[in-house]
């Protein structure tokens, strides 16, 4: 199997159902930044009593870890220029770059008060003008940066 991920026609409806379920069950928006904020806030106060957002973030981390273990370890493919550039003994740079990028995205999301998943999934589903603008900005920036990186490399 070349791609170890769900097909878009399965993953899309499942994500949509998750957005609706979170709205119905918790009257909240589905987003990852809220979960990580919950974890950091509670753990910094010495508490492990998380609400649904904390358990959601734990589930995301554990789900990815379990998948990697069952697949025989991390398999970095499909990351465009990174998997084309870093081969053989240089593959260690891929997870370092991904973790660094994730930290920057998380910092920006926390600073701005909303994350890509919260705006892109829940906010757009609610037709929030702010979420539509934020999502357009996320995608536009990603496209511009990818063209810039491609030009440099």
Image (cartoon, rainbow, N blue to C red):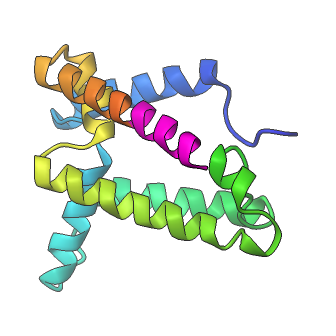
| Residue under the point 11% across and 47% down | 113
Q: Residue furthest bottom?
A: 46
* Image position, residue 34 (x, y; %): 22, 52
Q: Nearer the viewer, residue 72 or 99?
A: 99
Looking at the image, is 19 positioned above or below residue 142?
Answer: above
Residue 79 seen from this side: no
Q: Nearer the viewer, residue 9 or 3?
A: 3
Q: Quadrant of the N terminus?
A: top right
* Prevailing secondary structure of the magenta residues: helix
Looking at the image, is 8 positioned above or below residue 100?
Answer: above
Q: Residue furthest right?
A: 1
* Image position, residue 8 (x, y; %): 61, 23
| Residue under the point 55% across and 56% down | 63
Looking at the image, is 14 positioned above or below residue 99?
Answer: above
| Residue under the point 28% across and 34% down | 22
The segment highlighted magenta reads: 142-153
Residue 64 seen from this side: yes
Query: Would you identify the image quadrant in which residue 91 lies?
Result: bottom right
* Image position, residue 46 (x, y; %): 17, 86
Q: Nearer the viewer, residue 86 or 96?
A: 86
């Amino acid at each position: 199997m070349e791609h170890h991920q769900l097909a878009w026609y399965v993953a899309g409806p499942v994500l949509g159902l998750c957005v609706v379920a979170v709205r119905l069950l918790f009257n909240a928006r589905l987003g990852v930044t809220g979960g990580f904020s919950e974890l950091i806030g509670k753990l910094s106060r010495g508490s492990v009593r998380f609400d649904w957002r904390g358990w959601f973030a734990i589930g995301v981390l554990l789900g990815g870890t379990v998948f990697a273990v069952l697949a025989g370890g991390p398999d970095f493919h499909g990351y465009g220029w990174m998997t084309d550039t870093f081969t053989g003994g240089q593959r260690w740079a891929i997870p370092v770059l991904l973790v660094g990028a994730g930290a920057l995205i998380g910092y920006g999301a926390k600073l701005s008060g909303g994350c890509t998943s919260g705006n892109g999934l829940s906010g757009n589903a609610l037709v929030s003008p702010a979420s539509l603008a934020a999502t357009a900005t996320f995608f536009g920036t990603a496209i511009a940066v990818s063209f810039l990186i491609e030009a440099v490399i």
